[in-house]
Image: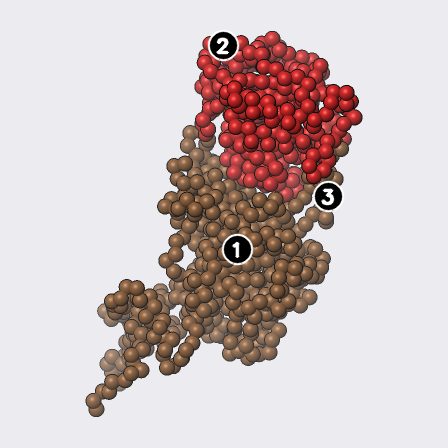
Chain colours: A brown, B red
Amino acid sequence: MQPELDMERNYKRPVKYYPVFDLDRCNRCGLCATACTWGEISMRVERVIDGKPVCVPFANKSSCGACHYCEKQCPEDAITIVEGPNPVTHRYWEGDIRNLYRQVDPAHPGHVLLISTGADSGAISYFDHLMFDACQVTNPPIDPLREPMELKTFLGRREYYNGLVSAGQESAGRLSAGSLKNDQQLPPVLELDTPILFSAMSFGSINLRVQIAEARAAGILGTFWNAGEGGLHKSLHEYRDRTIVQVASGRFGVNPGFFKHCSAVEIKIGQGAKPGIGGHLPGEKVTDQISETRMIPMGSDALSPAPHHDIYSIEDLRQLIYAIKEATRYEKPVSVKVSAVHNIAAIVSGIARAGADIIAIDGFRGGTGAAPRRIRQSMGIPIELAISAADRRLREERIRHHVSLVAAGGIRNSADVLKAICLGANAVYVGTAVLVALGCGLCQRCYASKCSYGITTNRADLVQRINIDVATDSLISLVRAWSEEIKELMGGMGINTIGSLVGNRERLRGLHLTTQELDVLGVKQAGE
Amino acid sequence: MCGIVGGMDTDRGMLKGSDFIEAIRLQHDRGNGQGGGFAAYGIYPELSEYYALHIACDNESAAQKSDDFIRAHLYIKIAEDMPTKDVKGIDWHPLLKRYFCFPGPSNEDLKLSNLSRTFVGEGWEGLDAYMKRFVFDFNRFVDGAYILSCGKNMGVFKGVGYPEEIGEFFLLDRMEASVWIAHSRFPTNTQSWWGGAHPFSLLEWSVVHNGEITSYGVNRNYLEMFGYDCLLRTDTEVISYLFDLFIRERGMSLQDACTILSPPLWEDIERMENKEEKRRVATLRRYYPEALLNGPFAILVSNGTELIAMNDNLKLRPLVAAQDGDRFYFSSEECSFEVLCPARERTWMLEGGKPEIVRIKGVPDAA
């Protein structure tokens, strides 16, 4: 039969990635086909020996997203993932042509493109344009192997006087040493052994095994993990001393018990990857455990509205902050997480005045389980600029010590951590780095719930790919390695306590930045 | 590298300026002639109710602007040129002026001791607070002139040159004071200018410093929130401002303030057996990380009744102490004690992160 031309095939997307099999190495075990959750690899009969078929792997060239799971699992190292050679001749349209085809594909007509993890656009990373200072001659560097280096960090409100004296008043005389208010009267704070926290990732977007690993690692590391907006599963209650829970617009799992099993409560206003956008966990993903944790019926869609339906301005936020403080008897710090947007400085100032103890700012590179691609790529601003602007505004308004700032969104390594701190953060949230520490190859398809690594899925067969003990150890290794590197950087700068770097832009210099960019960052040009 | 030396008689005796000039001369190699200075307390006993302004002006027009500014904001008891003499090694010096004055355009009949507050703009505030604002406004608005010191019954004498030359230039060899602190400068971070020499002073507090404050950016950010403009292009000024903030404005004890500026390491705090002390230190560290001084430093600080010697908690700069009866001395190098107190009964090395506080007898730290 003569093949027919078919207009629908016009929208076939040029293959971008696919596996190549080295059949000389391949032992025909078929593990790759089992490993691949995306339907890219199938086994085809190569020949028949003694009446038994021998199968070889075959790339369908239909759905590979370069997660690299098959490649890593192959016992013979016989797989290489390659990028397809199909050229798009028009350089300006190069990045968009596949997406455009996808949107007119008759299989999913007129749909909003979804994507996961943080923005992968080529926008400038300010972190890469900042250099640290180091000690030479006039000031000795400190060897972290010989001298103590202190990373201890406190998050929370620190507005605090000795009691009787307020600014502008002449003191009646000195108070006796140590005449502090009682501990009970001091605002609650979180004590961290390292300024790195695990960012909010909900039960639903990731699975319970990953959350347990985060919670255990946080306990051993002396830091905190954030349970995200999907409530807190009862098996996580035992980690309450290391848990930050979230109250988001969907209010999933928020009940009195929820507030008992945490160290701090975070109100989620926005997320860097999708500022101003809600969330949608499809009903088919709402398993019995997720249903129980989120307090919604099994199989029903879990919708997070774009706004909190009781927050239409700052005064409403204040009410929610104080409702939570009342519910937790003022024993737990309340954090507010917002996306880094254009007016972030004024927003942060308002949140500080509304009574928040901690403000987390999530830059546009922050990760997500699912977001519209256009939102992820083009809404919000980089965390480097946002944290610097927020820190400066709070100082100008003389309320910087009323809140702690946590920077999030695109922190890739320990130098990024320290640069964020020098730009004004007290600590940082890491999310994507947590996933990568579990093996994630950043294929950006978490929304599909087919994660081959078993991280961003709740499918019973895939979840088993996560070994909680191995995952816990990986997270511990990650944070310990970064902490050591931070100590090395601090030693070179001649600083032995992390508090002396919070907002210390004197220790940074900029490269290849415009005067205006340097100005917003508050950083001098290298050589100055 | 810099050299520092200081001393106090806790029984209110007077110490000779010539001894301190000689003591800092012995540390000649710790400086490079780019700055030297002295702070002396108890030197204006007849005018002890007046704030003594020591002012340096680059030229006549700056001096005129400075004079106008002072007359607009303060009542002036005495205005005069600072007594100096020509000294080999000091080729140029700014015009140096001295004013004895008092907040507010008042008249001399007003009994000063009855007036503890003054009315300014939005309300009543303390005289010290007024003077603090005056100093920051002056430094900001009067181009080419800067206030070297503004405390009562004290003064700072400093400039570009070796300290022994500066001491002679200001005729300090003929002066006696209850407390002296002195400095020889080897600048590494900022260019030398008369206002940038040590000591740095605000109201009664003055500071000399050997080292580098690597936390300067954080300290400055914190101080600027409370109205302290750091305009002198040096890390040392933050120290005097921090003392002023915690002790005068917030009414803290000197002990608490010293703990905030140079606290023990967390691992040492964990090991503390005294629970009250542990709570005090841990709370102060927890709440005032921005005021902690990081980097290598040896510092002498005084307010006339107290003399504080402090080292960074890793002890990266030299600082030794000596006691000779009621008299206490601190120095970068022990050699200075051979002039100041050859018959001393005790000499010891300061420990890192453990401030030494010497106080005039009978004066309590806290009310």
Residue A282 in view: yes
Co-location on one chain, circles 3 and 2: no
Q: Secondary structure at mark 2?
A: loop
Q: Quadrant of residue B278?
A: top right
Q: Which mark is residue B87?
A: 2
Above or below residue B348? Residue A39 is: below
Tell me the residue that label 1 is attached to. A343
Measure the C-alpha gap from mark 3 to mark 2.
55 Å
In percent of the image, x 56 and y 31: which residue is there?
B141
Label 2 resides on the chain identified as B
User: In the rendered structure, are the residues bearing label 3 and label 2 in contact, judged by CB atoms less than 8 Å apart?
Assistant: no
Comparing labels 2 and 1, the label whose residue is closer to the camera: 1
Instruction: Between residue A133 and residue A173, name the one nearer to us.
Output: A173
Image label count = 3
Estimate the spatial distance between the alpha carbons at disc 2 and disc 1, rounded to whole Å.
59 Å
Q: Residues within 10 Å of mark 1 (few under 14, many from 20)?
A: few
Camera-side residue of A26 and B137: B137
Amino acid beneath label 1: Asn
Query: Which badge, 3 or 1, comes first in the chain's sequence?
Result: 3
Residue A446 in percent (x, y) is at 44, 69
Name the residue tied to disc 3.
A181
Classify B256 as above or below A317.
above
Q: Residue at x 63, y 19 (%)?
A: B99
Give left or right: position of B57 versus B260: left
B63 or B133: which is nearer to us? B63
Query: Around disc 3, counting alpha carbons within 10 Å, would you say few (fewer than 14), some (14 to 19), or many (20 or more)?
Result: few
Snapshot quadrant of residue B312: top right
